[in-house]
Image: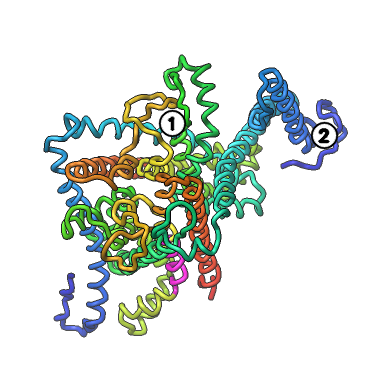
Amino acid sequence: MTTTTSAPAPARRQAENPLTAGQLPTWSPWAILGGALLVGAAIAALVAGASGSRFSIVATAVIGFILYLVAITVVSQLIEGGRKATDRLVTGVVTGAFLLALIPLVSLVVTVIANGMHRFDVEFFTYTMRNIVGEGGGVLHAIVGTLLVTLWAAIISVPVGIFTAIYLVEYGKGRLSQAITFFVDVMTGIPSIVAGLFAYALFALFAGEGVRSGFGGAVALSLLMIPTVVRSTEEMLKLVPNDLREASLALGVPKWLTIAKVVLPTALAGIVTGVTLAIARVIGETAPLLIIAGFTTNMNYNVFDGRMMTLPVFAYNQYVSPGVQEQAYFDRAWTAALVLILIVMLLNIVARLIAHFFAPKAGR
Amino acid sequence: MTTAAPAATTRAAAPNRPADVIFKAVSTTAGVLILLALAGVAIFLVAQAVPALIGPLPEDDSFWAWVWPLTFGTLWSSFLAMLMAVPIAIAIALFITHYAPRRVASVLGYAIDLLAAIPSVIYGLWGIAVLAPFMQPAYTWLAQNLGWIPLFTPPASGTGRTILTAAIVLAVMVLPIITALCREIFLQTPRLNEEASLALGATRWEMIRMAVLPHGRSGIIASSILGLGRALGETMAVAMVLASAGAVTFVVVGSQNPSTIAANIALRFPEAHGITVNMLIGSGLVLFAITLLVNAISRWIIAKTTVDGGR
């Protein structure tokens, strides 16, 4: 689109090169942006001087951006015409929206890392919160709790999810498979707190009111995890070429063996990726665990009995109900958040790597 | 389940292998289990909610009078969040697919996927520690200078933990989700349509308006509503950020904010007992109904627009 331009004065319609006439040179948006930011800074400085407040970078950016949009539109309108002007305006708006959205996301990551580093030490990973008031203590019990609850959630939902997907792709016809597809869709939309309430209502039947257990948390999480596993596995099974199935069946291999030895291995990388992403999604869930797993300061290895602390609930609990030495509680909350982000990132990266290295190569 | 294959035909039918039957039965059971689990969700929640729906409540007149302010808060905060998130998400998706250099775009797409996976409790921490103090001066200014607009009626909140802050946090949370989906959709625009448009002399924006956006319209709606579903059910971020008073008001900068259903459950459930538990579960049922409705609407819109588009 943008050809090389050397037209010194774009306003001159009778340029040396008629192809580039009536076009702004490529450097002009940047020049206008720089000018707009300078003017914005000047206005912000004047306002700051007049009102006696501090010089505001936010004001500079906002004023500069608006000035840039106005200037580029007007300049382009004069030289390039209306359609080009609209195009340049939209380019500015889209890029601006992107930069605007980057601010909170970058701020979030920076805040968590900066605040989380205070307690990122050995004690944090080797101590529980038992008998700890004020400083010190750690999240060992919460890490163990998170791992156990997530492990049980995976134990429940991975087989159910994969077999459901197999049913839908390989066997399902008629009413039942339609119903399952529909209700898996419905399940995707269940709010996480409702999943927690369900687990509570279910376990309250057997154990009475006020029941809390890690296994209940696992049931709630698996309710959130199953639809993700079904969806991703279904997609992967559908990608397996029908030729493979037919070749196997034609050789006289029973259907179940075809599925187990031909279809599943072909789709394995994709399925593992999907499961890993599903785990990454539920490992950070707070609300259902707050309701059904509760919180405690002690180590609990038994998922079937008693309250069980998990990392997200730990971060929440430390932050909203601090004790006397507030800062110690806040620091622990932030470090727990940092650990949680690291776990989620790690799971995501592992999933990508699996997808990248173990995916069946095309044309094999 | 249905294993009664007609094996008694005259020709040699395939033998009904036991392993085959078992494998099919296991698969079918898994599918039926999901249906049972969902039925269980509905039945258990309704059973636990019934005492609150019919019975006398300790503080309020009726269940519906108690749950209305919460429902209002849920809808209002999600509406504000979508108002901010959807246009920006579409813009980011367009930026990644059609404006950014190719090499940068793939890195950005990856980063957006990672951000979508950040747990909500972390957004809550950020909102309460960074965003609320940052927004507070702006709220004071809005209340002082634009107080005549009903949205900004003074007095402004002193902590910045208003429903607008909660809505901004929600918007930041759903932004990566909507962006990731929209990006996929924009990437699926037929390359030839785009090139034809450009070859006819369209500018980049005209190409996007005439080729990319019409192609992705139903996808944009679907992904927005998925984001809305997440915003409606979002619990922890709102529970942490919002300083709620249970009021029904449209003011977005004050200290009298409506709470949301999910946040209210999370805050009150750990200490709840007796009829309160039933009330909270009843409100959870209302939330479930709302999200179901939203999802049904989205599916209906997709079905309608897809057929009308003739694609």
Q: In this view, does B140 lie above or below B294?
A: above
Look at the image and say whether residue A243 sits in the magenta stretch.
no
Q: What stretch is highlighted in magenta?
A: A266-279
Q: Which of the image's four quarters has the N terminus of chain B?
A: bottom left
Q: Residue at x 53, y 76 (%)?
A: A364
Front: mark 2 or 1: 1
Residue B150 shown left or right of residue B130 in the figure: left
Q: Which of B14 and A144 is in front in this view?
A: A144
| Cα gap from disc 2 to disc 1, whole angstroms | 58 Å
Residue where numbered disc 2 is placed: A18
A18 lies left or right of B84: right
Q: Is residue A189 visible?
A: no
User: Where does the image place residue B71, in percent across and percent down from the top left?
Assistant: 30, 34
For this orientation, the residue located farthest to the left is B55
Q: Name the residue under label 1.
A: B162
Q: Residue at x 54, y 26 (%)?
A: B138
- Residue A274 lies within the magenta run: yes
